[in-house]
Structures are given as C-alpha cells and as structure tokens.
Image (spheres, helix red, strand yellow):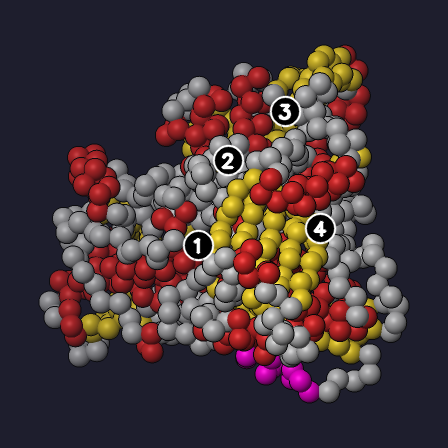
Amino acid sequence: MYFDKIATASLPRPAAPQVDRRRFLALSGAGLTLALVPKSTARAAESTTLATGLEATPFIRISPDNTVTVLAKHLEMGQGTWSGLATIVAEELDAAWEQMRVEGAPARVPDYANIAIGGLQATGGSTAIFNSWDQLRKAGATARAMLVSAAARQWGVPAAAITVENGIVRHAASGRQATFGELAGAASREAVPADVRLKDPKDFKLVGKRIHRLDNTSKTDGTAVYGIDMAPEGTMTAVVQRAPRFGATVKRFDAAAAKAVPGVVDVVQVPSGVAVVAKNTWAALKGREALTVEWDESKAETRSSAELFAAFREMAEAGEKAPRSMVAQVIGKPDEAFKSAARVVEATFEFPYLAHASMEPLTAWGRLTKDGAELAAGFQFHTLDQSNAARILGLVPETVTLTTLVSGGSFGRRANFQSDYVSELAEVLKATGGKYPVRLLWTREDDITGGYYRPMAVHKVKAGLDRQGNVIAWDQTLVHQGLMAGTPFAQPGKPDGGAVEGNALEQYALPAARLVWVDPEVGVPVLWWRSVGHTHNAYVKEVMIDQLAQLAGQDPVAYRLKLLKDQPRLANVLKVAAEKAGWGKPLPQGRFRGVAVQESFRTAVAQVAEISWDGKDFKVERVVCVIDCGVAVNPDIIAAQMEGGIGFGLGAALLSEITLDGGAVEQTNFDGYQVLRMSQMPRDVEVHIIPSAEAPTGVGEPGVPPIAPAVANALAAATGKRLYKLPFGNQKLA
C-alpha cells in the first residue's frame, strides 16, 4: 500500500498479557515478528498463523537490516508517546537507541486494545505509557530471550553464557557476536518462552535517562508525514460548508457557481453540510466561497453566551431542585454541619467554552478499494474511527484499513465517539462513489467554529468554617454538560465522570460535604479537553481553599497539608514544590506567589506560580512544578509535557474563550480565539520529578490543572481580589 513508505517515524493497573506457550510467531521475510496478546486471543491468532503463515499481531518487528520497529497502538500527537513506548521495549531488549523505529499499529481489537479505557484501541486519559508498561516490557524481554536462544543454538553454547548489550548478542568465551538483524530469522523459529525475567530497575540503562526523541529529526527537517500532508497522485481535496449554528441542517443549496470555479470536480451533500471537491485546496476553498446554502435552523441552538451563563447560574442556585440534577457525592451530614459553622463563605465560578485549537487542523485521507477502504489520519480512537467509517460505507470494519500518522496536536479533539471528521470523509467518499481518493481538509476557521468544545461550566460553592478556621462543611453545585451520555463510557444513574472528576471531595479531607451535578440541555457539541473535568474542578477547589486559608489567617501550604492527611503523594509534591519555590521566604518588591495541587490521571502535581505586579498589569515570571508520575521513562519528555501543560493552561486562564452570539461562534482564528504567545510564557519553568519505583502513570495532561489556580492565587496575594471567572484577560484586576 501507499502507506508502507510513510508510516514509520525516525481503573486498576492493566495486567501483563499472558502468552500461550505454543508457537505464536510468524515469519515475515527473514525477520522476527513477535506478538504478545492476551491469552484469550492467542489461540485464535495462533491457529490462523500456523495454518496460513500470515503475520500475527506484532508489537515488535526486527528486520534483517537490524532495525527494531515498535508497532504503537497509541497515537503520537506531539507528546512523545512513541519515543516512550520505544524506550520501554529497547530497555528490556537491550537494543541500541539508534536502531529503534516506531510506526502506528493497525486498527485491530483486542490485539491492540487499551486495557485502561474499556478495551477500545484508543489514546486518551494519559494512559499510553500506563497501559503499555507491563505489556511492552514483557514483549521486549521475550524478544531478547528468543534472540539469545537462537544464538545459543547456532553457536552450540549455553544461553546463560550469552549477553546482550546495545543491540549486540555476544558469547564472550568464544568471541562470537551477532546483530539482532543477523539472528532475526533464526529467532523467529524459536518457541515463545512461557515466562521471562524482567530487569531490576537498578539495571535500567535507558529508562529514566534523558535520551533524544525518535521523531526529533523528522519533525525538524519536515520529513514527518501528517494527515494534512497526504496527497498521493490522483487525490482530490474536499472542504465542507457547515451550518453557522449547531443543530441546523441543509434546506437547499445551489452549486452552479461553485462548479464553475476552475478545478472543482464535484459538489455533494453530506450530513454535516455540503462538500466541495476539487483538484487542489485553493479551488476547493474558492468553490466553497461561491456555494449558496439555505439552512433549516428550526432545531438549532440560538442562545448567546450571556443567555447560557444566566441559565446556568439559575440552575446552580437551584442545586438539587434544578431539572436534570443528581447528587454526585455526599460525605457526612453537610446540612447539619453548616448549622454549627462560625463563618460561611460563598462563591460562584464561571468557565467559558474552550476550543482545542491544535496546530494541525482536522484532516483525513481515504480511498475506496476493491476489497474495502484505506484511510490515513492521526487516529485517536482507532476502534470507533474504523467502525464508524465502515458503517457509513457499508463495509465490515476489518476491510477498512487505517494507517495512523503523527498528528499535530489533539488535546482530545480527535477522540470523539462520532468520529466526526473521519465520518465526514467517509460520507464524501460515499457520495462521490469512490471515483478518486479524497483528502478532507478543515481550515483553522472550520476547526474553531466547527464544534466540540470544553463545556461551559458554572459552580456554586458554599463552605463553612469553625472558629479556628477549619473547613467543617462544603456544598457545591456544578452545572456542566455531560460528556459520556450515549457513549460506551456512560454509566446510567451515576454522575458524569468527565464533569465531576478532580473535585474537592475526592482529594481533601472534608468532614461533611455534598456535590450536586446538573446536566443542562444545550445544543453545543462538547468533548473532553486536555485534563477534562480537572481543568475547572481544580480551579474551583484550589481558589476556594486558598481563600479559606486566608480567612483563617493560615499559610496556604500548611492549610492544604492538613486537608491532605490521607493523600501522601499530593502532600509530598506540595511540600517539595514549596521548598523548591522558596515558599515563605521574602520576595522582591512587586513579586507574589500562589500555589495549587491536583492529582489527575493517577499523577500528582503541585505548582507554585510567581508573578510580577505593578498595580495595573501582571506577568507570570516563574513556575515551579513538582510531579510524581511513578517511574520516569524519559525525564526530558516529562519535563516537556509539564512545560507544555503550563503553557496550555495559562492560555486558558489568561486569554482563551469561545463565545456565542445567537448560537453562532464569534471566534474564527487565533486573532479571536487567543492562545498563549511565546512572549507570555514564564521565563523560568522548573520541573522536578519525584523519584519513584512505582509503575508509570500519565504525564500528557496533569500539568494543566494546577497552573490557573496557582496564578489566580498569586494575583489574589497581589491585589486582594479573588477571580471567579475565566479568562482573566478581560477582567479588571486593579
């Protein structure tokens, strides 16, 4: 296939897969292809392999040219996942880093299922390393054992006398040695060992070390292939005219002027609007400009942001009495506790819709074949993308081949259950009869106005303090569109996890508390956004707790530590962050500090933000970040993700918002939907990683939640004003 040349790039803890003792290998040329899948699927795959000689589902491929390719079941969207996965394999295999390669695995469940998120083949929830750690360690160790076994058989020496280091298999006594590539063919004929010994962490040579990312060169010199780069010979470009208001549908359209544009080859209606197909991007865009569409807006969302916020505030005030409300969690007897409170503090927090705004807009390529279809894109939900495309095209999923390319960001946008952009491509292929390959292209404007946002939210919080300033009662109502309804993750009768996760009741020792969730009916499509519910819940929790500490006349760090008596990891990162930031030590004139701490995606992060304030404006000057994420597979990638998360979170805190006017999105590009500029990034960002022997957890998202409240708390220290609305940029601070 065309993709063969471009695909390679230079909850409880999931259990390691159980490998069937019988041969579960396939000979691929002269190389070794190793598969490790759950035992329940091994027999079926084995029978196919042995009967036909076809390749079983591999994680590792060792080629005669001595390259080791890891087939990654997770999407690489800039976070360093592919390099992290390769590091795990290379460590147990004792490979040289220079021989490692990665390519996206095919769409195939259960072989490539993400055990951490329901068995789908998917990337999300900062689970890639968490889900793959045990699995790929065992895969690497098994491949190593088979290479050693092959060498021992060829050389007539005991396997115990053979060593492997830096990609070379050696028998010191005889002086013999061989590369992985030289042994791969023979290794493929060895039996899969029933069990293998994994390295003691003290013997790690790559894990925990600062090694360069495998994709550094390709992303620097421009050779990396993204979805937007897909344009093999004969490919047409399609753009879609979508409704200006969510929920509107096409009533009628006139394509005459569009078809008259040179290069336009077709204009077809699809469920999301009207697609213009052309020989090149310019013609497609000019054809769309010439298109006339009349919309049926009888079922469209027509409310403005102001109207929605007003409705949300009413629901927050109503609490349990609001329609579509649910008590999400109760601790003790909060109503009784409030009666004895010496002081009651109330606050209402407001958060706007947010776009994902990744640097690479949504793009996908596809073509119909005699046997099915081939699609290429940055697939984040492989299972759903494949099945949705197959349903639209009238195919069985197995005949829809997905080639996963690197993606220029996502932040959750590519992971939606409707597979909207992939489904849209399938609809265009269907409508055009598969006459030619199609690259579906979203412009930046399409991406920002096209829907699926971090939900708008309003929180109403009431806290009761005793005479010593201790929190004795907490009552919180959260108004926030649900994310899970109608999806495989839905839990009827239970609160929406994407809405309520990371709230104060989960992390602080509150003696009496209640959390109410209200699911408003709004026509705006919503989706998880980097760190999901933690983005707003952490802000509410940390700003409110900081305010209570101030009212109690207590140090904000010490106040939090009392409430973290049952959370040793959170308490530890908070202590270390305070120490590294010099908390409690005098600051220069005009400098102020704020702190926040949050556990998200099994990872604990504390941040101290230091700002400068001149009485009118402020700038974030320094951020100290401390993270406990278990074993640090690659400290450089972890630091980069914390730095990126801080920048991402700062953009939302200071600048970003999606607003509606009559139901239509007002922002269209980065001039309206502002993200953080390099000049606004703190000059000094320190990342400290807590040493740990625990298995790795997530790092893609946990850096985001603490930064906004840490900055807000620093601003409160500077100005005496608490900020209950985001973003800060359009508020009077002085």
4 or 1: tag closer to the N-terminus: 1
Residue visible at 81% across and 70% down? 719
Q: CA distance from mark 3 to mark 1?
A: 32 Å
Name the spot of residue 336 as percent of width and height, x first: 54, 58
Mark carried by residue 90: none
- Chief secondary structure of the magenta span? helix
Q: CA distance from mark 3 to mark 4?
A: 31 Å
Categorize mark 1 by other alpha carbons within 10 Å: few (<14), some (14-19), many (20+). many
Residue visible at 60% across and 53% down? 476
Name the spot of residue 417 as percent of width and height, x first: 50, 35
Q: CA distance from mark 3 to mark 2?
A: 21 Å
The secondary element bearing badge 3 is classed as: loop
Q: Amino acid at mark 4?
A: Glu
Q: Amino acid at mark 3?
A: Ser
2 or 1: tag closer to the N-terminus: 1
Mark carried by residue 350: 4
Q: Is the residue under label 2 in contact with that under label 3 (CB below 8 Å)?
A: no
3 or 1: tag closer to the N-terminus: 1
In the picture of the structure, the residue carrying the numbered disc 2 is 485
Categorize mark 3 by other alpha carbons within 10 Å: few (<14), some (14-19), many (20+). some
Q: Is the residue under label 4 in contact with that under label 3 (CB below 8 Å)?
A: no
Q: Amino acid at mark 2?
A: Ala
Q: Which residues are magenta?
A: 575-585
Is residue 380 visible in the rendered structure shown here? no
Residue visible at 36% across and 38% down? 108
Quarter that holds the C terminus: bottom right
- Report the front residue among 527 and 102: 527
In the picture of the structure, the residue carrying the numbered disc 1 is 128
**Comparing marks 3 and 4, which lies closer to the viewer?**
4
In the picture of the structure, the residue carrying the numbered disc 3 is 272
Q: Quadrant of residue 702?
A: bottom right
- Report the front residue among 131 and 140: 131
